[in-house]
Image: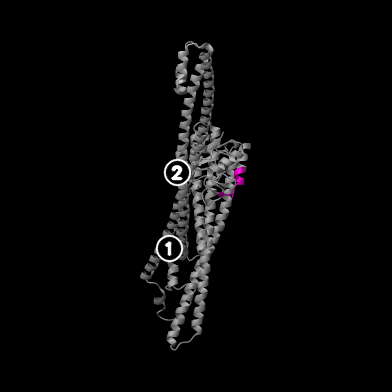
Amino acid sequence: MQSTPRVRRGPRVGVRAASVSVTVALLTLGLVAPASAEPDPSPTSSAQTLPSAQDVDAANRAVADQEAQVATAQAQYAAAADRLEQARREAALAAEQYNGAKVRLETSTKAYADADSRARAAERALAAAKVNLGRVAAETYESRSDLHRLEALVTPGGPQAVLDRASGLATLGELQTGVVRQATGDLTRATELRRAAQRAQEQRKADETAALAARTRAGAAEQAAVAAAQATQAAQDEALATLARLNQTSIDLERRRQEGLRVEAEQRAAAAREAAALAEAAQRESESLSADVRAAEAAAAAAAKERVDALQADAARSTAEQTRDTTQAAADRAAREAAAQEAAADRAAAGSGSDATDHAATVAASRRKARAARARAQQLAAEASRAGRAADRARAAAKAADRSATRALRRVPGYLRGSAFSVAAPNPRAKKAIDFAMAQVGDWYLWGGAGPDRWDCSGLVQGAWGAAGSRLDHYSGSQWAQTQRLPLSQLQPGDLVFFGKDAASIHHVGLYIGDGKMVNAPHTGAQVRVESMYWSDLLPYGGRVR
């Protein structure tokens, strides 16, 4: 399940520049005449059109209040997303704990079966030894030798009494003595193995109880995550409606804008974590490297920086395009409003009233509203045009940054490309595992799922490496223990990446495929997909299947 940071603030469309917003507010109120307005011939024209200090203060307060409302709505949207992410993480941890309980139950069940089988074999050997002992006793009885001692053997004290007393037959021959010793040893082994089988059975029952409890907890956590998703959707819909009203856009446009902001935040956070991981690895390894290898490390660090710049440039492009779309929508709406105001002014001019003075005042007021609406539409159209040019520049910058990052990567020596941004070819077994996992892209997540078309995180990894001929448990904790530790800087395609506070709290695992990406089954409601491995709780060590 992807843990990603949430955007608390983003570009505030419609209120990004206070001066423009104040001007627009005054124009809307009809307090400032646009530059294109015809001069009013009346001597009081200046007093009627120039805003007072109180008007400006009121407009400033209106803008500040709108900015605060936008910020609050965006914070509510982000907080709802954070709550959903936490619920998903808890559900993933509970599901993996259930997978661990199942693995332990499978282990104890097998241990009990093995112990019971050994105990049964020992009991069969004991039964055979008793038959031999009975034969010895019969032969001794027939020979009437030391009869009083044989009577002690066959008294009704049960098999244990027979074996306890048999070793005291000093008159038996060596063969007879060997039979007694064999029977005594078989009894000891059978008793010990049966006790071991009983302990194994008790452990299996305890593990079965624990597995049922873990399943109940996982189911409850899953339901909580589903409920959180529904509550999040309702809270975000309400926030989007507020943002659409404040920014004078549509709910769909605001939803796309918030998604753009989320992607931007994820890209920035992933880029920062990637840069930090590469820097840490370079610092750790450079201490023992020679000068020429250090130069190669510098090239790798430069390539990492270029990649971070490229990701940030792409995020800026996304934001610029969202801003352009939002501003253009506001401009289109303002143009429609201006047209409506002009039509109203024309109707007022064409009409007549009983009082010529009142009619003239009405027409003049309608004309002022129409001019203010047209000025506002022109202002927003100019903003939309500037936003479009900015988006074009951001798109060009993103392409240039991507080309620069590609060139920088090519300058890194091949032996250093096994880092988090490498695309080195995997070995044949790893390729089989990756091919299997990639073939499942689009399948839906199901906690406890292990195929053929529903998966959870550890089930997908188990299936992928199973296709490559390696057995892994269906539990991320076991997969951590079953793989070789290595730092993130040494990851190769096919390695595993783990997520959690520490090794004891792993709640997610993915299959690394190169270029800082993994294929994974994220969480309920999501499909198997390829995405950045740089979640916020990525552990600093991966796992290599031996």
Q: Is residue 324 magenta?
A: no
* Coordinates of residue 208 in the picture (x, y in percent): 47, 39
* Residue closest to the eye, 331 or 171: 171
Q: Is residue 438 magenta?
A: yes
Q: Earlier in the sequence, mark 1 or mark 2?
A: 1
**Start-end of magenta stretch:** 436-444
Q: Amino acid at mark 2?
A: Ala
Tell me how far mark 1 sits from mark 2, CA to CA: 58 Å
Q: Nearer the viewer, mark 1 or mark 2?
A: 2
Q: Is residue 206 above or below residue 222?
A: above
Q: Quadrant of residue 293?
A: top right
Residue 14 showing in the rendered view: no
Residue 409 showing in the rendered view: yes
Residue on which the image places disc 1: 18
Q: Residue at x 48, y 70 (%)?
A: 376
Tell me, for residue 213, which label it has, or none: 2
Instruction: Classify mark 1: helix, strand or loop.
Output: helix
- Pointers 1 and 2 in contact (C-beta within 8 Å): no
Q: Is residue 324 above or below residue 425?
A: below
Q: Residues within 10 Å of mark 2 (few under 14, many from 20)?
A: some
Instruction: Classify mark 2: helix, strand or loop.
Output: helix
* Residue closest to the eye, 357 or 505: 505
* Residue closest to the eye, 373 or 19: 373
* Coordinates of residue 272 in the picture (x, y in percent): 49, 46
* Coordinates of residue 209 in the picture (x, y in percent): 45, 40
